[in-house]
Image: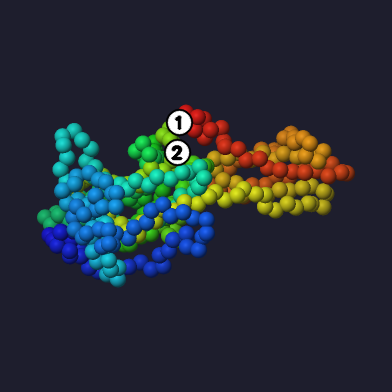
């Protein structure tokens, strides 16, 4: 069959462009773009083995025509795109059957702990073996690593029949998300990582959430951004491949934590409400002496979040009948996360 990465042909000429793609950083003033690329000719030449070495991209299996730059692969989507896969690579004995490309991205997550990553991608399926119509298929990962090269977390597009679907890894355990993808279709992958809270959210566009406020990494590795990587794990060694384009990586300051609604009931009870995120404990404190001292002995006044972000509330059912009571909410890193940071 014709290799689309060598001859410049389109393996799936009936593919069409998905509509309505966007990235949430537009119009945002407090945003720092860490990296973006559309793989266009001003930086990249078309052809196999033309990705690694350009614009700081690194990779394995150089010279084996297993990664590079394509052009005009999708109908309605003109221009260059990057690819990983298709040809059969060779590996030294006793080494993992794995090909990767990576791009370093260094960032100070202390001052701007929110990192958003967006990328167009498509998992292009293998051609069946003509004699028996068997498809040989593999797995494709989008991984996030720290400056030491340690993998923190990854998203796995498993193209095999046995494990087909979208999986995520926290660096220790891989879990099936319950979501699938459509082969040979252009997808928009959106990822938001909160390094301060060690949480992340993943979606395929605005209408297809996959994770929301889940734990980002369970490793003991330093919690920082060092590089993004795409990996091709050869499970069956098929001629499937991943197309990727329009990468944007941006950083944001963490949204200021503040109390939302404060209401007073008919009996004088006071209710505080606020948005809570995983990774933090919230302690409601009060003062009856005009801020001279703060106390934490109200029953049920310590709150935390289980799972994703949630609206938290606390009701002081017996405030003093006379005088004035002041409240504040103190947010602290949860003990489990604090221990992990100390061990790092």
Query: Marks 2 and 1: CB-CB under 8 Å?
Result: yes
**Residue placed at 34% from the left, 58% from the top?**
37
Nearer-the-camera pick, 221 or 266: 221
Residue under label 2: 223
**Residue placed at 56% from the left, 45% from the top?**
277
**Residue placed at 71% from the left, 43% from the top?**
328
Local secondary structure at mark 1:
loop
Residue 158: % across, % down: 31, 49
Residue 33 visible, this angle: yes
Q: Quadrant of residue 170?
A: top left
| Relative to 139, 219 lies left or right | right
Disc number for residue 246? none
Nearer-the-camera pick, 120 or 106: 106
Residue 331: % across, % down: 62, 40
Local secondary structure at mark 2:
loop
Q: Residue furthest top?
A: 343
**Residue placed at 19% from the left, 52% from the top?**
49
Residue under label 1: 344
Q: Quadrant of residue 4?
A: bottom left
**Mark 2 → mark 1, Cα distance in angstroms:** 8 Å
Residue 252: % across, % down: 50, 52
Q: Quadrant of residue 60?
A: top left
């Amino acid at each position: 069959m014709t290799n689309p990465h060598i001859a410049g042909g389109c393996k799936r000429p009936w593919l069409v462009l998905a509509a309505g793609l966007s990235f949430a950083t537009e119009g945002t003033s407090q945003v720092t773009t860490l990296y973006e690329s559309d793989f266009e000719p001003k930086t990249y030449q078309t052809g196999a083995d033309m990705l690694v070495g350009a614009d700081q991209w690194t990779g394995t299996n150089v010279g084996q025509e297993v990664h590079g730059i394509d052009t005009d692969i999708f109908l309605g989507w003109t221009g260059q795109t990057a690819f990983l896969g298709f040809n059969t690579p060779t590996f030294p004995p006793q080494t993992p059957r794995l090909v990767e490309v990576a791009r370093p991205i260094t960032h100070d997550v202390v001052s701007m702990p929110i990192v958003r990553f967006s990328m167009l991608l498509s998992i292009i399926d293998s051609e069946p073996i003509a004699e028996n119509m068997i498809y040989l298929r593999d797995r494709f990962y989008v991984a996030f690593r720290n400056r030491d090269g340690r993998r923190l977390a990854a998203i796995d597009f498993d193209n095999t029949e046995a494990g087909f679907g979208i999986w995520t890894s926290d660096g220790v355990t891989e879990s099936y998300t319950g979501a699938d993808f459509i082969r040979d279709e252009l997808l928009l992958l959106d990822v938001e990582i909160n390094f301060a809270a060690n949480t992340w959210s993943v979606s395929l566009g605005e209408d297809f959430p996959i994770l929301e406020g889940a734990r980002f990494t369970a490793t003991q590795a330093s919690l920082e951004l060092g590089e993004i990587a795409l990996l091709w794990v050869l499970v069956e060694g098929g001629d499937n491949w991943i197309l990727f384009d329009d990468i944007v990586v941006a950083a944001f300051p963490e949204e200021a934590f503040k109390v939302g609604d404060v209401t007073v009931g008919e009996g004088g009870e006071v209710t505080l409400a606020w948005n809570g995120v995983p990774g933090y404990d919230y302690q409601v404190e009060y003062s009856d002496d005009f801020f001279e001292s703060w106390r934490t002995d109200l029953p049920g006044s310590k709150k935390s979040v289980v799972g994703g972000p949630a609206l938290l509330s606390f009701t002081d059912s017996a405030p003093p009948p006379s005088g004035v009571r002041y409240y504040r909410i103190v947010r602290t890193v949860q003990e489990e996360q604090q221990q992990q940071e100390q061990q790092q």
